[in-house]
Amino acid sequence: MKVEAMNDCCAPPASNGKGRYDLVVVGAGSAGFSAAITAAGQGAQVALVGHGTIGGTCVNIGCVPSKTLIRAAETVHHANIASTRFDGIESGARIVDWAAQIAQKDALVASLRQAKYADLLPEYNNITYHEGQARLVEDGVDVGGQHLASDRIIVATGARPARPAIQGLAEVPLLDSTTALSLTELPRSLIVMGGGYIGAELAQTFARVGVAVTLVFRSRLLPKAEPEIGQALADYLTGEGVTIMRGVTYDFVRKTADGAALAITRNGGHEVLTAERILVATGRTPNTEGLGLSEAGVVQTSSGAIVVDDRMRTSKVGVYAVGDVTGKDQFVYMAAYGAKLAARNALNGNSLRYDNTAMPAVVFTDPQVASVGLTEAQARAAGHPVRTSVLSLDNVPRALAARDTRGLIKLVADGATRKLLGAHILAPEGADSIQTAALAIRCGLSINDLSEMIFPYLTTVEALKLAAQTFDRDVKKLSCCAG
C-alpha cells in the first residue's frame, strides 16, 4: 500500500460527524505514530498529518540506516584484527562494493518503513492520514487549505541536522548525518565536525572502511558522558587511525581543488585541515518552520525547540509537543514514550508526568557507550554524598575470554543510602547490559542489591555486579563467581 493513495475521500467520519477530530497529530514519524495509535486504542478519532517520507528520522535516515552500516564496518574491522587477538587464526576483509552495501541498507529501510508505518494505517479505522504542510490555526490545523478541526493537537515534527554559523559553509558541498549514509562511493579522506554521538559513530565507521578520518570538536569527545569514558573512547579511536583534534574553534570553510578545507584555531595557533569531504555533525535543529507556532501562542526556545512541561503541554492550551521538536531526550524510544503520554493526557485530563529518571542512552561506537541515571557531576550538583566505583574490563571474565578488554564500568551511588544513582558502561557489548542498570535505578536498588544479585557467568552484564562489589572490596582477590 502506498500512503499517497490514502486521501480524504477514503477517510472514516470524524467523531461527531461534523468534521471534528478528537485529536490531530502533526508529524508521521515514530512519535506521531505512537501518539496516533495510542489515541486510536482509546477509541478516539485521529487525524495524522504527514509531510514528506512517512516514518520520520529513525527508520529512514537515523537509527536503522546508521546502525546497519556501523555493523558492516564492524564486520570488516574485526575480521582484520582477529589474528591479533586469537592465535592460529588468519582472516581479513575489505570493502569491494560500498554501493552494494548502501543498496542493501536502502532495501532494509524501505521494508521497515512499509511494514511498520505505511502498512499499519489500514489497521486503524479511526486514524485518517493527511499529507501536506500543516499549520496551527484557530480551532485546529490547516493542511493545504483543508481544515482539520480539533481542540487537541500534538506536534511531533522532529528535527534535522543543524548547520553551524561558520564562514564559507554555504559555499562547500557538505555532508551531514543524512547524506553521509547515502554515499555510494567512499571518499579518500573526511573531516568530521562534532564530538557528539553522531560524530563519534560516523568517524569510526568511515575509518573502518578505509577512509582517512579527522575528527574535530570544540570541547571533549562525548561531552555528556563521564570524562573517563570519553577519554578512553578517544584513545581507542586514535588507535584505529582516526586523527582527533579537540578544543578547536572553527574559523572558516572553503573549497579546494581536491575537496574542502577547514580553518581552525587550536591552542592559540591557526591550522588549515584539508579533505575530500567535510561531514557536519554539530547538532540538530527542530522542524518548526511553517507551523505558525508564534501566531498560535506556542513558546519556543532560542534554538526553536518547542517548550513543554512535564505533561508534554505547550504554552497553548490543548497543544502538546513530543519528540525531537522539543529538544528533549532525542532518542526514538523517548519520543514514542512522550507521545503516548501526551495522547493519554490530551484525552484523559493531563494526569501523567514525563519521567526520564531511568532513561537508558547508547552510543553505537565500538566499544559501545551506554548510560543511565546521573553522572558523578550531576549527582554532586544534586547534593548527594557521592561514591563511585570504576572497574576496567580486564577484571571481567567475559572480556578476557573474548580477548577484548577495551572499556570500563563506572557506577555512581549515594554514599549514605548506597542507592544506585547512575551506571556508565564502555564495553563491546555495553548496549545490551544497560537495561539491567536501568531497572535497578527504576526500582530503587542499592549497590548492595547489585552485589548480591545472581548474574550469569561470562557475560558482559556480570560487570555490573563486579563494579558494585568494587565499592567495598578488591575483585581481583575473588575467584570466579565467588561474590
Image (cartoon, helix red, strand yellow):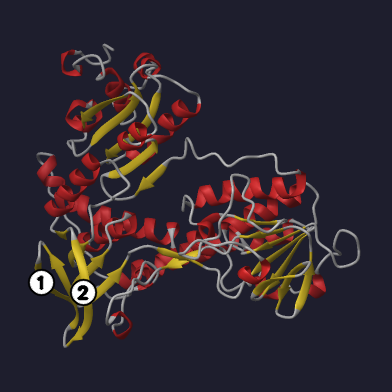
Provide the secondary structure element on which disc 2 rests: strand
Image-based side of 10 in relation to 103, left or right: right
Question: Which of the labelled discs sits on residue 119, or is there none?
Answer: none
Q: Residue furthest right?
A: 17
Q: Quadrant of the C terminus?
A: top left
The spot of residue 479 in percent (x, y) is 20, 13
**Residue 405 image-quadrant placement:** top left
Image quarter of the N terminus: bottom right
Q: Residue furthest bottom?
A: 257
Label 2 sits on what residue type? Asp
* Callout 1 amino acid: His
Residue density around tag 1, few if under 14, some if 14–19, many if 20 or more, within 10 Å: few
Compute the Cα span from label 1 to label 2. Answer: 9 Å
Q: Which mark is residue 251?
A: 2
Residue 365, position in %: x, y? 29, 50
Residue at the spot of label 1: 270
| Residue at position x 10%, y 41% in the image | 88
| Residue nearest the observer in this picture, 235 or 55 | 235
Q: Residues within 10 Å of mark 2 (few under 14, many from 20)?
A: some
